[in-house]
Each structure stands twice: as C-alpha cells, then as structure tokens.
Image: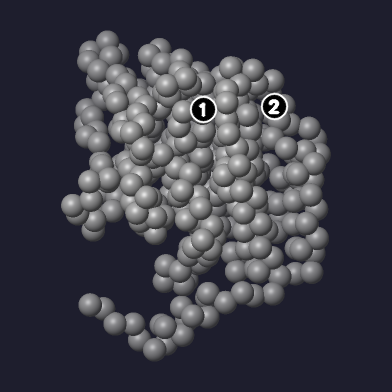
Amino acid sequence: MIMQSDSAKEASSEMTEFVDAPAWVAPALEFADAALRDHPPACPPPTARQEALMILDGPLHLEAAPRFRGVYEFFERRMRRAIKEIEESAVTSGTRIWRLYNHGFVVRTPSVTLGMDLVRGWLLPGSGGVRRGIADDLAARLADQIDVMTLSHNHADHVDPAMCELLFERGVPVVAAPDILLNITGQPLLSRPERVTRVPAAGVGDADLHRLRPLRLARGKEIECVVYPGHQGDAIPNNVYLFRTGEGCAVAHTGDQHDEPDLEWIDRIGDHHDVDVLLVNCWTNDMRRMVSGVRPRLTVTGHELEMSHGPDHREAYWRSFQIFRDGAVSPSLVMGWGESFDYVDGAIC
C-alpha cells in the first residue's frame, strides 16, 4: 500500500474545492441554458441553437472551469432534468436518444433502454481521482432505468466503477472491453466479449466479423449486437458496438475509436448493416471516412467539452459544427449535456 504524504493530501484536498469564476461566466451559462431549452436539438439546427452551444465553448475552456461552482451547477441541473425526463418518457414508437455527459448516451425504444459509457461526471484535475458528478440518489435513479450498459474503453471519462456497481445491484449487465474492471472477479453480470484480433480482408471471413449475436439484458430482455475490435491509439482496446433492437433500430456507438488501421472494417459496416444512428466521438481523426463506412441515417456527436481534459483537449462545439457545416458528410446532430432527440422511422430533417 502506498501512503500519501501530508503535503500530497493537502494538495489533493485543495484541488477539490470550488474556486471563483470570472463575473461573465454565470450570465453566459444562464443565457446558453435558456437558449438551448428554447431551441432543442433539430436537424438542421437553427442559428440560435448553434450560437448557444458555441457560447459554452468560452467559459468551459477556462483552465479552472472544472472547479467553478457555476459550471457544476449548470451540469447538475441539466442532468437532473434529463434523468427526470428518462423516468417519465414512455417511448411507444421510434427511438429517443439522450446525450448525458461526455460520450455517455441513453437510447430507448418501446422494448429496451440502452446505456453507453455512462459516468457521473468529470475527474477533477490534480485531485488524485476525485470525481465531480451527480449526487448518489440521482445516479441511482438513472441506473433504475437501464437494461444494459456497454463500456468502450478503459479511460475514466468513459468508465465509472461506482455507476457499474449501481447497475450490478439492480441486476443489470455491463459489457466491457477486455481491460476494463479487471479488479472485479466472479461477477456474472460483467462480460468482456471476445474480440477479433486480426481484421479480415474484404470477403475473407468478413461476414462473420459483422454477424449480429444475441446480447442478454436485464429483466429477461434481449437484443442483437456486434462488438467490433477497435482501438484508441495502438495499445488501448476500444470496443465499437452496433445494436439492433427488437423494433429493428440499429445504433452504433464508437467510444474513442480513431486509430487509422482499424478503418478497414469500419469502411464495410454499411455493407452489412442498415444503420439508423451513429453516436460518434466528435474528434475522430477522419469523420468523413467514418460516416461513409457506417452510412447512418443520422450522426450524433459526443465528447465535446469533457472537463477532465485540459483546455486544449476539451473539444469545442464550434469544431463539431464546422465538420458537418456543408451537410455532405451526413445528417447530423450536435447535442449539449442532458438533451434528447426523437428519431422516428428514419424521419430526421
């Protein structure tokens, strides 16, 4: 066991305290919050909505923004609204998509509710692993709504062990990449699907790589799923999941997929599956190629403004709008924390 020195403990404690924000930060957050409520996700987005999201780029790129009380209250308020909406939403047709924090999504159809990379909030830089997130009761209410959660890769902005424990307590399975939660043994609700280690050439074992397999959910439910063998960089396994619900809706979630060699199989996903929605990390290094390979009816970005990162890696909303500005890549949505959108039978724009 490694003991912390008193000075290290003091430094860690200091980094968990709220700090004062510049006077202009609170009005900017209040304006953006109100504007986003007046102009919810739409494709194409109205100008007022784009402006509201890009206004957030300013205060949330300040170095100390993860420690501003106003930023946390803005985040918590939007998470509370979203979780209340998830609790009260009975989807009778189509698919409702909630973007929570970072690349965490909840997808609900009439038969199932899927959770992907759900975390309670962000790690405070320099705090030794302290997470500033939603309260325990709110996290538990979210866990109550989920039938299965998938985890893409072993980074703290995508994996929250406390959230996983809440799901296990409720009998909800968690599906993870091979190096996630290795300290947990004997938990039947945790599975790490076998990954293909060699990506086949086109037409050589290709169909088997793309084959849908049953995925067990809570409460006796079942869907079909493909787990693709992605990576973040060379060394970090990153599962790319594609789900097909009982209603026939196909949703793909990329995690932090971006490694160039893996795109050989990404190029062919659309050949094997009719994908409705692609939930993609906004900073993937070749968005056009990613979308062209998957060929979704709708692309939804995530990972903007992840507060555990330094300002240079808190991806900005303006950049996401720039990527899709000419409409040639795909019909797309850029969503803020806690927002939702109804995808109904392919009717998007």
Residue 12 image offset from top left, x and y in percent: 46, 78
Neighbourhood count class around disc 1 (C-alpha, 10 Å): few under 14, some 14–19, many 20 upward: some
Task: Give the CA separation, mark 2 to mark 1.
Answer: 23 Å
Q: Residue at x 57, y 77 (%)?
A: 17
Does residue 299 sit above or below 186 in this rendering?
A: above
Q: Residue at x 69, y 74 (%)?
A: 20
- Secondary structure beneath disc 1? loop
* Colour scheme of the rendered structure: one colour
Labels 2, 1: front one: 1
Nearest the camera: 64 or 69? 69
Q: Residue at x 75, y 63 (%)?
A: 25
**Left or right position of 46 against 331:** right
- Secondary structure beneath disc 2? loop
Q: Earlier in the sequence, mark 2 or mark 1?
A: 2
Pointers 2 and 1 in contact (C-beta within 8 Å): no
Give the residue number, with chain letter if any, for mark 2.
43
Quarter residue 115 falls in: top left
Q: Quadrant of the N terminus?
A: bottom left
**Left or right position of 301 against 267:** right
* Residue 111 visible in this rendered orientation of the protein: yes
Name the mark on residue 334. none
**Mark 2 belongs to which amino acid?**
Cys
**Left or right position of 50 against 154:** right
Residue 131 image offset from top left, x and y in percent: 48, 65
Name the mark on residue 110. 1
Neighbourhood count class around disc 2 (C-alpha, 10 Å): few under 14, some 14–19, many 20 upward: few
**Mark 1 belongs to which amino acid?**
Pro
Quarter residue 216 falls in: top left
